[in-house]
Amino acid sequence: MAYVKIKPIHSNIDKALEYITNPDKTSNSTLVSSYGCSISPKVAKLEFEIVNKKAIKKRKDSVIARHLIQSFSPEDNITPELANKIGQELATEVLKNEYQYVVATHTDKGHIHNHIIFNTTSITENKKYRSNKYTYKNIQKISDQLCIENNLNVIPKSIEERKGKSYKEYMETKKGSSWKEIMKNDIDKTINKCSTFSEFIDEMKKQNYVIKQGKYISFKHPNQERFTRGKTLGEKYSEESIRYRISNPNKIELNKIIEMNDKNKSKGPGFKKYAAKKNIEELSKMTKIMSENNINSISDFNNLYTETLLKLNQSNETIDAINKEIEDISSDINLILAWKKTKDISDEYFKLKGNEKDKFKVENQDALNNHILSQKKLKAKYSKTKIPKLSTLKYELSQLENTLKEETMRNYSLKQDYITFSKLKDNIRYILGLESEIENKELIDRRKNINVDI
């Protein structure tokens, strides 16, 4: 079993190389190897720079190297020598002997792991190494294959189980001890059996969770010391999302239809069967969504799509306006509080005379200035009306915050509808897709007749 992750290096590459080639971590450097450069950090840095300078004009970002980490499970009982061999094979397969790299196997922790630092400029064509989710998936795929070839276990393919997790988190999840996973599972189960948000809060409290509701909802398990914001668990665990999921228990999650382009057609009969099955599922979802929203024609869909988009834009504008009002009122409250806080000092100042007054002014200059400035700003803003009471402003602020919360929930719901309709739009366009020049012409003719906007 091996988990891989990759991160960019923007500077101090020599320090990164020194860390991974540390003799104490690599059995006196016997578990260090390289390609196209020295295993010496200082020399390798210079060799990386020589290659980088050749392509410096083509560089559009500051990533000078990348650091790939391949972690093995203690369950595999892998030897350091085999781990290093797999690391070299991974680097060779991923980088195709086009990029300089240093491979180092660390044995100083509970699990053996490889560090691979490679230059992002090719030594053959001076081209830039492109790193994205597809290259990452390819690296993990190659690592998995190498594990299989060496009779090691492979981490399950579930994206939810792997995405964004460190090796430690993956192992904790596997053992059921990750706090994030425990909390997410508890929240998911509770959402599924509740019909209102207040019922959800009560049920979570019955499970000994402490809930903190403010700008963001936060949870604390009895065995935790600190609160965890729902949003840090993932978008599905924000307050807006939790409320939405409770109110929409049967919400259909539509996915994009798998296009049978040249690339996918070349993947063989197994993939074609998989794609056909998934596309039938999505077509079934599309039919249900269209039925639920009374979509009986392209015109119906276009009207609903446009209406949803307009509502979402209006909601965004409303939220911006409410936030502006909240900002203004909060500013006034702060001015009044500042004025009140310094009023006694100001009153005392005007009671004094002569040297005592001058001395008092020097000692309390900041407070007196704050009092004058806050008073000046309040009078300027309320030159034609009476300055409102602090209690009145606080009440208005409370009302606005409640309105903002309601509009934020509505906005989230509109976003989910818009996301669904956007995917539906893409799928409809693909179904009406341009498979040939003849179909292209026929489709254009039909669209002219029915005024299709999609």
Image (spheres, rainbow, N blue to C red):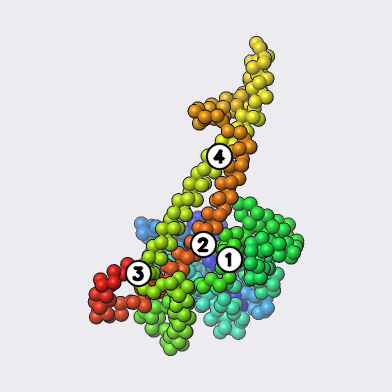
Count of marks, rendered view: 4
Callout 4–callout 3 Cβ contact below 8 Å: no
Which residue carries the number 2 mark? Answer: 413
- Distance between the alpha carbons at the discs numbered 3 and 2: 23 Å
Q: Which mark is residue 247?
A: 1
Residue 48 location (% of width, % of height)? 46, 61
Residue 349, image quadrant: top right
Residue 108 appears in the picture as rendered: no
| Among the two numbered marks 4 and 3 on one chain, the one whose residue lies closer to the N terminus | 3
Residue 355, image quadrant: top right
Q: Residue at x 60, y 45 (%)?
A: 398
Residue sitting nearer the eye, 46 or 353: 353
Q: Residues within 10 Å of mark 1 (few under 14, many from 20)?
A: some
| Among the two numbered marks 4 and 1 on one chain, the one whose residue lies closer to the N terminus | 1
Residue sitting nearer the eye, 245 or 259: 245
Which residue carries the number 4 mark? Answer: 329
Callout 1–callout 2 Cβ contact below 8 Å: yes
- Distance between the alpha carbons at the discs numbered 3 and 1: 29 Å
Which residue carries the number 3 mark? Answer: 299
- Distance between the alpha carbons at the discs numbered 4 and 1: 32 Å
- Distance between the alpha carbons at the discs numbered 4 and 2: 28 Å
Q: Residue at x 39, y 71 (%)?
A: 426
Residue 6 location (% of width, % of height)? 53, 66
